[in-house]
Amino acid sequence: MVQKGPRPLVLCGPSGSGKSTLLKMLLKEFPDRFGFSVSHTTRQPRPGEKHGVHYHYTSKEEMQAAIQRGEFLETATFSGNMYGTSKRAVEDVRRTGKICVLDIEIEGVKQVKQTDLEPLLVFVMPPSVEELERRLRARNTENEAALQKRLETARKEIEFGQMPGNFHIVILNDNLDKAYSELRDFIAQNFEDKNEGSQSDVCPEQ
Ligand SMILES: Nc1ncnc2c1ncn2[C@@H]1O[C@H](COP(=O)(O)OP(=O)(O)OP(=O)(O)O)[C@@H](O)[C@H]1O
């Protein structure tokens, strides 16, 4: 069981919506306040990604065994790869006194809502699927098949993200500065003095 601390902040949104970009901006501006929960994944590292920093890279077999041992808070399979947040990853951040930030998929969001972490849930919304496609193509990190799979998943995720009650806030990322400013405002409203309190009922369980 992960011990209680500040409520974690969850960023969720379709691949290419801008979660990592917003997260990077947040960690850069407030390095002492927020800490990133390093997920596990079975996907290959992208150029520039570091083991233990961006992800803990692992094999399917090892990850399945760790899940069996109850070491994960949430896991999801996305585009053929497994992803997950270990209890240890959240605990490592909590121990530093920082607010733990999780970058997870919808299936993972559903699972962390069932824990006693009481996360604050942010959905990052792309302006459109067409724009998402443009950004993913420009990022150039996926092959065509993987890209198509991401876009197909994105349509379902956008639907879920917009459904009332699923997230505490939906941030439209049509302009990065505007989206970041909305994220900052949301954090200011929810983490100033309120973070130790009880969970609001704006985001009921599934
Ligand atoms: N508002 C924006 N306008 C234009 N481009 C953007 C905007 N926000 C992010 N991008 C660009 O879109 C691409 C995807 O963003 P990012 O990598 O942050 O997405 P992500 O949601 O973290 O995706 P994944 O889940 O696949 O890691 C990046 O190249 C980023 O620079």
Image (tube, rainbow, N blue to C red):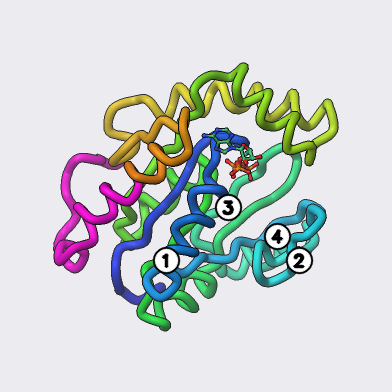
Among numbered discs 3 and 1, the one appearing first in the sequence: 3
Q: Disc 3 versus disc 4: distance between alpha carbons?
A: 10 Å
Residue 147: where, in percent of width, then height?
A: 75, 29
Q: CA distance from mark 3 to mark 1?
A: 17 Å
Q: What residue is drawn where x is 37% and y is 71%?
A: 33
> Which mark is first along the chain, 1 or 4?
4
Q: Is residue 105 above or below residue 53?
A: above
Q: Residue at x 74, y 67 (%)?
A: 50
Check the image and report above or below for 110 versus 115. above
Say which of marks 3 and 1 sits in front. Answer: 1
Is residue 186 highlighted in magenta?
yes
With respect to residue 133, does 184 lie above or below? below
Foreground disc of the pair 2, 1: 1
Q: Quadrant of ligand 1?
A: top right
Our reading of the magenta stretch's main secondary structure is loop
- Asked if the residues shown at circle 3 and circle 4 are in contact, with their CB atoms under 8 angstroms apart, the answer is no
Q: Which residues are magenta?
A: 183-206
- Please name the amino acid that badge 4 sits on: Gln
Residue 100: image tag: 1
**In the image, is 144 to the left or to the right of 98?**
right
Which residue is label 4 attached to? Answer: 64
